[in-house]
Amino acid sequence: MKMTQATQALLKDKAYINGQWHDANDKAVFAVYNPATGEKITQVPNMGADETAKAIAAAAQAFPAWRALLAKERSKILKKWHQLIVDNVETLALLLTTEQGKPLAEARAEILGGSNSVEWFAEEAKRIYGDTIPTHKADARIIVTREPIGVVGAVTPWNFPSAMITRKISPALAVGCTIVLKPAEDTPLSALALAALAEQAGFPPGVINIVTGDRKAAATIGKTLTSDPAVRKISFTGSTEVGKTLMRQSADTVKKISLELGGNAPFIVFESADLDKAVDGAIISKFRNAGQTCICANRIFVQDSVYDDFASRLVERVKKMKIGAGIEDGVVIGPLINERGVEKVRRHVEDAVKKGAKILFGGKTLERGPLFFEPTVLRDMTDAMAIKEEETFGPVAGLFRFRTEEEAVRMANDTQYGLAAYFYTRDLAQAFRVSERLEYGMVGINEALLATEVAPFGGVKESGIGRENSKYGIEDYTELKYSLVGGIQ
Ligand code: NAP
């Protein structure tokens, strides 16, 4: 990575606890690699239960003073953080691409999109309204207020190593909560850079704490966060499997929970669709971040009469996609995050081919490096294939065929997931009918980019609990308090 003064200032090799940059107690570290080159970028502390407990204690100590600030004072610090993120977008994007692999343009978009959450919640900090309720007794009054829930334990994934953090911690900070956050092993650097800017913005010590740990340490850190009674809420983004574990572990201390988990998004192309727009949408929805987004189209359902036409248009577009390191000009597909990710993609393609799918384009890794997988289009997909059940989390577009609207909706809903769904139609009645029948938290109708700070992001079924961003996202970090004031004669 090109080491400018700006990069040096934000490239941290220590964790951040109670306003100080810390090593692990035993000085253990783990390496962070550039997935495009396999080179080591730096190393960060490999922490465990003791350091996590220390971070929780710091967050608990910082909580009373942070919640007692006027909303406007918290808002000012959040706004300053937002501005610092925007001012440092180029450095943050370079750092993100270097540790995560996505094209620089996508990294920039992630940083700015994530900073929008900070700005939005800085504004919302001043609007945490309660209620007064018409009384049931002449001499009493009912007041309902919203209070910060307390210390929040947050765990975030590698696929959006910046935006998943700002989206979680901004509403929590805005309402007066304090945070202990564990970023993913593959991408701790974006988290630490955000903490460095938060420090500059003036968050008091203990309000934001970042504990780093590798994949083995994750379970210990998670266990500490979920078992400590001082942590009042767990907010997690990642796989459904780990989400369920954290939910189980949180039961003993009855914590509030927000889970943003896996998806298996259907992308339906009806014969009534504008096919060019549907192809544009499929490219964005399927191949952004090399297919490693939780709201990626995973099963593409195309109506019989337009199936071949859609398939050939999609292949023409996919053929032109430039693959390479995210920092290279014009690259739209970077490397996958790690060998585990590549293995899953390879398994899905092999399984589909074995069961009768045909590869229209791609299908293998590139000589350029072990983590580069070609954007791939498969046709003749069936329900017997792994892609029908599991999120591929890679650049593989599998095309399923359907005949009727009824059949498309049934196939789309035939999964335990319910995060995002997409469909393309120019038939207004069909748009309403299908949208209402899809069992998903988010639906894109002739639109493939759903995330924005102003709208509620989240899923139903085994895709999660709660919503992030928007006015609904802030409620998850508050508790309602009902006060009955008597003796009013
Ligand atoms: P993951 O394995 O669940 O990891 C997510 C985070 O959990 C990482 O920080 C990981 O640490 C940590 N972790 C792993 N095991 C843990 C444990 N036992 N206790 C506590 N923390 C633990 O998921 P991933 O493979 O990194 O991410 C991909 C998944 O996230 C996909 O399923 C995707 O759909 C989902 N996702 C969902 C959303 C959404 O908003 N719904 C957004 C993005 C991603 P290590 O990295 O150190 O293992």
Image (spheres, rainbow, N blue to C red):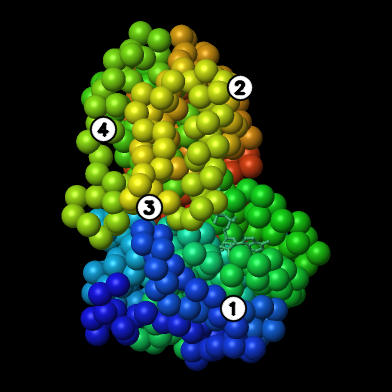
Q: Residue under label 1, please give it.
A: 46
Chain-order first, disc 1 or disc 4: 1
Considering only vertical position in the picture, is 22 above or below 1? below
Closer to us: 483 or 257: 257
Considering only vertical position in the picture, is 423 above or below 145? above
Residue at horizontal 24 percent and vertical 27 percent from the top: 316
Residue flagged by tag 3: what amino acid is it?
Answer: Gly
Mark pair 3, 2: CA separation: 31 Å
Residue at horizontal 40 percent and vertical 73 percent from the top: 41
Quarter of the image where ligand 1 sits: bottom right
Q: Position of residue 108 (x, y in %)?
A: 27, 61
Q: Nearer the viewer's eye, disc 2 or disc 4?
A: 4
Residue flagged by tag 1: what amino acid is it?
Answer: Asn
- Mark 4 residue element: helix
Q: Residue under label 4, please give it.
A: 319
Q: Nearer the viewer's eye, disc 3 or disc 2?
A: 3
Chain-order first, disc 3 or disc 1: 1
Quarter of the image with the C terminus is: bottom right
Residue that protrudes farthest toward the front in the picture: 367
Mark pair 3, 4: CA separation: 19 Å
Residue at horizontal 51 percent and vertical 59 percent from the top: 157
Considering only vertical position in the picture, is 235 above or below 489? above
Q: Position of residue 86 (x, y in %)?
A: 26, 70
| Badge 3: residue crowd in 10 Å (few <14, some 14–19, many ≥20) | some
Closer to us: 250 or 280: 280
